[in-house]
Image (spheres, helix red, strand yellow):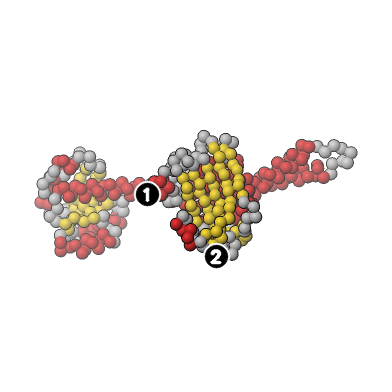
Amino acid sequence: MKSNPAIATSLPKGRILFVDDEPALLQGVERALRPTRADWQCAFVDTPAAALDLLQHSTFQVVVSDMQMPGMNGAEFLARATAVSPETVRVMLTGNADLKTAMAAVNEGHIFQFLLKPCESDRLIQSVTAALLQHRVQLAERELLREKLEHSDKMAVVGKLAAGITHDLNNILGAILMQAELELRYARPEATPNPAFALIHEAATSAATLTRELNSFGRSQPIGAVQNVSLPELIEASLRITRPLVKHKIKLQTELAPDLPVLRGNPSKLKQALMNLLLNARDAMPDGGAVTISVNPCRFTAADQSKHPQSRAGEFVCLAVRDTGAGMSPQIQQQIFEPFFTTKATDKGVGLGLFMVQRVMDEHAGWVELESAPGAGTTFGLYLPIAGNPEPKALA
């Protein structure tokens, strides 16, 4: 097994365990890997039992095992190694006679890849390098999943806290409203009404409406109960919640067509989708701008599919959210609906908002269309069937 020093440059660091019952082969591997020793810490053992014991007490990123060994073949050893050290990436050295066994081990997930004997040193180094990189990928994916789960747990706690806070706020606001109403209703006829109580009553009424909206938004509902939805009312309810979250330098405006048809759907889910788009538009305009919510009825025929690929024949309503932000490149647009994809900092978003919007549209037998270009803003169009079209799916 001859080594090529050129291939040993820029290798990922790691610890590798080599298992083979032939001392001469282990010595050959050790000599071939000498140029890599600055980057790799290698251990060599001649029995599967010794290797399993070592895996229990030491950390290795990669294990390379022979196939034919006395007492336990390589497939059995690597299967047991999976249980002992699941994070270790496993590579098998095998001959043609054991090829079916090696392929079965790959299919069962016990090994990352196999190498046929005789194996050139360059091929071995390339394989171990790929295994080390695979180990890095696995760790990164595991860390990402852990962060997402932690974030989900935090959001669940925040939701419970919000529900409790809105309940307490409603109790406090109820007392304020009751006192203001008493003062307004039973003021002496000869006395001049105190305008302060009218202002208190109006402000408390607005606050109580907002807390009810927040409580309804955060409450888990059996979404299968589909009902008639008025889009103007849904938009106004969404704006009551999002207005405090939108900076004053961002202008919110609506353009609603008259005599809009009735939709069939779940108001809470649709409201959640709209609010996600509004907050997404806000984040796209850190220096200010305008957000326009427009609603227009539309009719599609089979001929419209060239312009609207997801469309189908029927009557729909388009609820569009248009911003004057920076816009998106075609590359970002291709990924924007993928779960956990985000262009924001890790403390600004987790990349689930637009994924959720698309899911809500799927559940409501509708679809999402995106128009954007760098420097030209972004428009998300939610196309929803009006009452009389197929009912939305039973939502989870």
Which residue in the structure is indicated by mark 2?
390
* Residue 180 drawn at (x, y percent): 77, 42
Q: In the image shown, does 161 or 234 lie closer to the viewer?
A: 234
Q: Quick check: 301 left or right of 165? A: left
Q: Residue at x 20, y 45 (%)?
A: 42
- The quadrant in which residue 201 appears is top right
Estimate the spatial distance between the alpha carbons at disc 2 and disc 1, rounded to whole Å.
41 Å
Q: Quick check: 322 left or right of 107? A: right
In the rendered image, the residue lying farthest to the right is 190
**Could you say whether the residue bearing mark 2 is in a helix, strand or loop?**
loop
**Could you say whether the residue bearing mark 1 is in a helix, strand or loop?**
helix
Q: Is residue 311 above or below residue 4?
A: below
Residue type at mark 1 is Arg
Residue type at mark 2 is Pro
Which residue in the structure is indicated by mark 1?
142
Q: Residues within 10 Å of mark 1 (few under 14, many from 20)?
A: few
Q: Residue at x 29, y 61 (%)?
A: 108
Q: Is residue 274 above or below residue 386?
A: above
The answer to whether any part of residue 49 appears in the image is no
Q: Residue at x 21, y 50 (%)?
A: 127
* Residue 218 drawn at (x, y percent): 58, 51
Q: Quick check: 238 left or right of 154? A: right
* Residue 36 drawn at (x, y percent): 18, 42
